[in-house]
Amino acid sequence: MPELSRRTLLIGGTALAGVATLMSKPSDKSGPRDPYFLQMQKALTDAGIATPTLVIDRARLNANIDTLKHHLPQGMGYRIVAKSLPSLRLIDHICKRTDTDRLMTFNLPMLLALSTEMPEASQLLGKPLPVQAARQYFHKLPPERSDAAGRVQWLIDTPKRLEQYQDLAKDVGRTLNINLELDVGLHRGGFEPGSELGAVLHEIELDPNVTHGEIEKKLSVMGANLLVENLKRLERDNSKFIGQVHSEATYAKKIDKDETKINWSLDATKVLAHIHGLSPSPGAWFKYENERFKVLRAKISTVNGKPSYVLDDNLTVACKSNSIQILELQRQGKNKQTAKEFLLGKKINSGSILN
């Protein structure tokens, strides 16, 4: 038997004491437990849950939601910040409780998940998404959920990003809803008031997806404001009158009915301009089975085919290059309809020819 010194015994005793300390259960030195949390702990124990678990008190959550709704100013909408609620079931519950489908999202995985599981939701990007991520969104979005993309509002903070998203819109053949981020003085990004912002707004106003009717409505408001302004100038007697140069005046001829017919053998960009330039009146039109249909709104698609042929069951019609997807149309003597509403009653199948 080896000889043990007093020092050895002391060290060994210290080690054993340490083991004993680790193995013994520490005494509970906390104060009295709240009955609410004791009840919650018992419920978890009874359910056999022994791992870290997020527990949400639905009654208290609903009370908080109701309090928030009560204090919202009249006419103000409620938008749920989804990044704080990383659970689709929880987001769905809050949407139903608040009676809103308006969400704010911040990244591609969240955007895709919500578009797939909650396609009717309106999603606003809380920060600008790199155009590569936005491109992946359209690539990965399931085809049966393609309508959800029309409910996404993309955030634009620089002229360069606007240019990138314009190219993206052309590539995917879709109209993108955008919001401009404004710098409110914190210098954390966004447009500052001035010439740069003005140039971007002008660029957006020139969007080919705006119809003649929409431009006419804007001009009527601008014209009314200018009329009031000029009448005030007349009162002040400081107006400058400029006569018309008659040699430069032009006469706008009446648009002939044949001029409004859609020529599918042109490039899709020209066909789109023709449709929107004549919408809502007199309206660009085509014939199918001896019936005339006005096209009131459309968008460019990158699918190609033989001009005037319908390429799918969503009213996508081939042009000389690319194609046009019809979004709104009107039968003779009927009210205007979306393409979806129209196709519920009248079928124009893939392979049909529009004259």
Image (cartoon, rainbow, N blue to C red):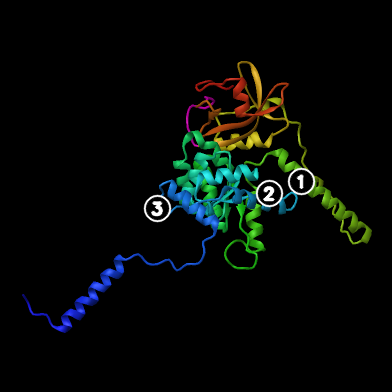
User: What is the span of residues highlighted in magenta in the rendered image?
Assistant: 302-310
Residue 342 drawn above or below residue 12: above
**Closer to the N terminus: mark 2 or mark 1?**
2
Q: Does residue 267 appear left or right of residue 328 in this picture?
A: left
Image coordinates of residue 286 in percent, x first then y, are 63, 24
| Residue contact between numbered discs 1 and 3, judged by CB atoms under 8 Å | no
SS for callout 2 = loop
Image coordinates of residue 282 in percent, x first then y, are 72, 30
Quarter of the image where one finds residue 16: bottom left
SS for callout 1 = helix
The residues bearing labels 2 and 3 have C-alpha atoms spaced at a distance of: 38 Å
Q: Looking at this view, is 189 or 293 the one in front? A: 189
- The residue shown at (64%, 45%) is 98
Q: Looking at this view, is 319 or 163 the one in front? A: 163
**Residue 272 in view:** yes
Q: Quadrant of the C terminus?
A: top right
| Residue contact between numbered discs 2 and 3, judged by CB atoms under 8 Å | no
Q: Nearer the viewer, mark 1 or mark 3?
A: 3
Q: Quadrant of the N terminus?
A: bottom left
- Residue 308 included in the magenta stretch of the image: yes
Circle 2: residue type: Gly
- The residue indicated by pointer 2 is 77
- The residue indicated by pointer 1 is 219
Quarter of the image where one finds residue 333: top right
- The residue indicated by pointer 3 is 51
The residues bearing labels 1 and 3 have C-alpha atoms spaced at a distance of: 64 Å
**Closer to the N terminus: mark 2 or mark 3?**
3
